[in-house]
Image (tube, grey):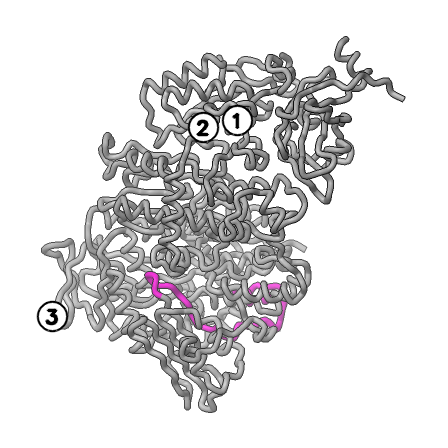
Amino acid sequence: MKARTSWDVVCTVDDLVPESGVAVWTEDGPVAVFYLPHRLPALFAISHTDPFTGKNVLARGITGDLKGQPVVASPLYKQHFNLQTGQCLEDEGVNVETYPILLDGNNVRVEIPAANKESVAA
Amino acid sequence: MSKKNLIVIGNGMVGHHFLEQLVATPAAADFDITVFGEEKLLAYDRVHLSEYFSGSTHTDLAMGTADWYAANNIDLRLGEQVTAIDRAKQTITTPMGDYAYDELVLATGSYPFVPPIKGNDHPHCLVYRTLEDLDSIRASSEGVKTGVVVGGGLLGLEAANALKSLGLEAHVVEFAPRLMPVQLDADGGALLKRKIEELGVQVHTEKATTEIVEGEEARLRMNFSDDTHLETDLIVFSAGIRPQDALARSSDLAMGERGGIVVNDQCTTSDPHIHAIGECALWSEKIFGLVAPGYTMARTLASVLNGDQKAAFTGADMSTKLKLLGVDVGSIGDAHGQTQGARNIRFNDEKAGHYRRMVISEDGKKLLGAILVGDNSHYDTLLQYALNGIELPEQPETLILPESQGGAPTLGPDALPETASICSCHNVSKGDICGVIDAGCTDLGSVKAETKASTGCGGCAALLKNVVDSELEKRGVEVSKDICEHFPYSRQDLFNIVKVNGIRTFQTLIRDHGKGHGCDICKPAVASILATCWNEHILATDHVPLQDTNDTFMANMQKNGTYSIVPRIPGGEITPDKLIVLGEVAKEYDLYTKITGGQRVDLFGATLSQLPEIWEKLIAAGFETGHAYGKSLRTVKSCVGNTWCRYGVQDSVGMAITLENRYKGLRAPHKVKMAVSGCTRECAEAQSKDFGVIATENGWNLYVCGNGGMRPRHGDLFATDLSDEELIRTIDRVVMFYVRTADRLQRTSVWMENLEGGLDYLKQVVLEDSLGICDELEQHMADLVGTYQCEWKTAVEDPEKRKRFREFVNAPEKKDPVQEWTTERDQRRPLLEGEPA
């Protein structure tokens, strides 16, 4: 089992935008946090980096669902990513990092793998 | 086996069609094909010649391209006139030399007949046949007032239309007692005359011109046999055509008594290796002056050369359906009732201006012919009865009576037999259409591409659509207009649902009328509809998540994730002070700066968090958002107008600013561009815009639904000589009708092309208020104009909205680590992928 760090507080509930995303800075780099109040669970965290371009933009995409899967569309070239699995719907071979996320009172916490923490620290 | 030489003389519509047909057969491989054209231009559409004066170019009218000829190994020799045929040696001669042929095709067409009137060789006596003729007419019309067309037939009225669109006071002089004597009877001709005169064209029938002399008030004077006269600045002869048969005559081919190259059913002349098609050919003592029979001859000859021994030309239907100067005219079959025992049914509504006549057989069972003036809506049905010998209903008069008086609905496509001819230009039957649908065509566009139906004169467009729709429906093909998986509706349906139910949020709409949570297709579309209906701020909490990133952050995302900023510069007019502010802001934030095609300034490379700061500065200097990010009005481009320009006739800059300020912020199905030119020199390129305005001496001409970009389209002339108020009212109505009825991401050009009834329908709705909605459209526009706000001003003043522009919500000081820059031509730009820093 992978060693994990504690759950980092990345923002508060007030920072979230319903049905949309915001970007947060973590020790694993930029992460996109989405809040979809009409779903359960309502919080999702995936990498903010668009794997097709390497640019940090995914939090600024439009959210929704396709065939029942919660997705975000990259604002650059419109590929869709499953918010739960990180899988790209248009290209089987591409996926983005996903992170466990939870609400702790007023705080939003994201779990960052320890290995990634170290690599960033190094 | 070596190839045989096939030479085609003449590159007109029929000659071109023949080549298209021939290269589609296996026989094409047996021939080296050479084509000689007297004109320097590639074959073009002569049927729509008058459009040359309303903006169409040779390219628009061209039938094919030089590339097509090259791709099919056809040696195309334009501007090289054939001067002789040596039948014994099987050669032809041009100024460039002799060429040998095995088979020779004459497709030399016809020339305009100029009646032998004294003075007809005056330099301002012209004809109407080629683009070159049209250039001469245009040149002759410069700076003068009046033009006369001699000849009141089909082509003459087309020519009158051309003179009218050049701004001349147009007259038609006809020798016969009525207009279009071949196609119409006395009542029909009289109604047509009245209608055309209402449109400002003077018609003089039963006038024989005796001589043309120098005029006193105009250039020329025409003296008539009844001792009256008419003064005019130019004369266009359009008194019929004569076959262009001089080559054939000098090589001793069999000729008709009054001209024309005699051909048999295989379109072969008295020489078995020489063939003739189109208007130069005389078949069964007849010359056919319409394009459809010419095409039929072309097809027949292509089959003959392909070895089809049964191929035969057996005559052609001369029915015609036209819009002459905007008046519907139709003539079918035996229009004059010359068949023995023929009986007539006539309906003549002088008040509405509708005349319809049916010629039926003695037993009352078959339709032999018909005449329609003023309304062609019965044409398709009547033509099908006549062509296919469909038995008439017991009370045949119901076919031409208005519905309110017991008239029958038009013949549905289901009632047509498989053999029914739908497109006579390309000889496409209903059976052919069913065939390509069975082979996989599932929409109108692919049926047209596959069969060529409706790509000739276009008269069958409505009928074709009905047949295709009905056949698709029969096969259970449902042409889905659903916007996406979340809503079983088209954009237009959604617009009506939102409007009628007063829905103000996406959540309500999807809960009550859709399913799931939405996606990047339906959310921006609904956001646009909500904005059009209620005009709330796009960053209101409910609307934020619906927007594309450009709308969310009110800037245009570029490939490296940064944004560009385009402040509004109405009409492209800017003070030096404001220009300095743009420069200062760009300098402070190191923004790459470029002038756009829409006469404004684009500032590139701002990060998300810089946007509100930059806008604070721009707003303080008096700038507003330019909506470069929205599906909304972009710019109204203008030339400098009569304030400065020596040629300008109106204040184009002033009008452009008025229009830009009126429509700024309006959300539409797609972006909308406008332009205003101060004179006909058209420096603002208005005809390539969604809405183009061109100044005239008397006001403004409005063009609609033009486009530049990937698929350029010239705007259609919509209304002329409008006052300022009329112009704005007309644009209000068209814009709102577009916004309400277009599909998602459909530009006005495509919207127009898909609008059933096209330009005429749009004119009826907007100019004649045929749907009774113009008041509502104007009111809706007034509401939108009244609730305009600069989105950026509202956003920078609201701390909650500004929060949205934080790059990382938990680390305001953090900069995006992946943006890398370099310098080129003294400005900062992003590093390209793989480029060293």
Q: Secondary structure at mark 1?
A: helix
Counting from the top left corner in percent of width and height, residue B705 is at 43, 47
Closer to the camera: disc 1 or disc 3? 1
| Cα distance between the residues tagged 1 and 2 | 9 Å
Question: Element type at marker 3?
Answer: loop
Label 3, residues with CA under 10 Å away: few <14, some 14-19, many ≥20? few
Work out which quarter of the rendered image holds the N terminus of chain A and state it: top right
> Which residue was labeled with disc 2?
B794
Kindly identify the amino acid type of the residue bearing the numbered disc 1. Answer: Lys
Residue at the spot 67% in from the left edge and 35% down from the top edge: A36
Same chain check for tags 1 and 3:
yes
* Residue farthest along the left direction in this orientation: B216
Which residue is painted at 76% across and 27% down in the image? A98
Q: Secondary structure at mark 2?
A: helix
Residue B615 showing in the rendered view: yes
Q: CA distance from mark 2 to mark 3?
A: 77 Å
- Residue B227 marker: 3
Question: Residue B631: x, y in percent?
Answer: 49, 38
Q: In the image shown, does B367 or B545 lie closer to the viewer?
A: B545
Nearest the eye: B84 or B534: B534
Q: Which residue range is magenta in the image?
A: B298-327
Looking at marks 2 and 3 on the same chain, the residue that comes earlier in the sequence is marked by: 3
Q: Looking at the picture, how far across and down is residue B332, in whole percent?
A: 43, 75
Toward which corner of the image does residue B302 lie, by quadrant? bottom right
| Left or right, residue A11 beside residue B563 | right
**Alpha-carbon distance for marks 1 and 3?**
83 Å
Closest to the observer, B44 or B576: B576
Q: Amino acid at mark 3?
A: Asp
Q: Are marks 2 and 3 on the same chain?
A: yes
Q: Give the quarter of the image for residue B400.
A: bottom left
CB-based contact (under 8 Å), mark 1 and mark 2: yes
Residue that mark 1 sits on: B801
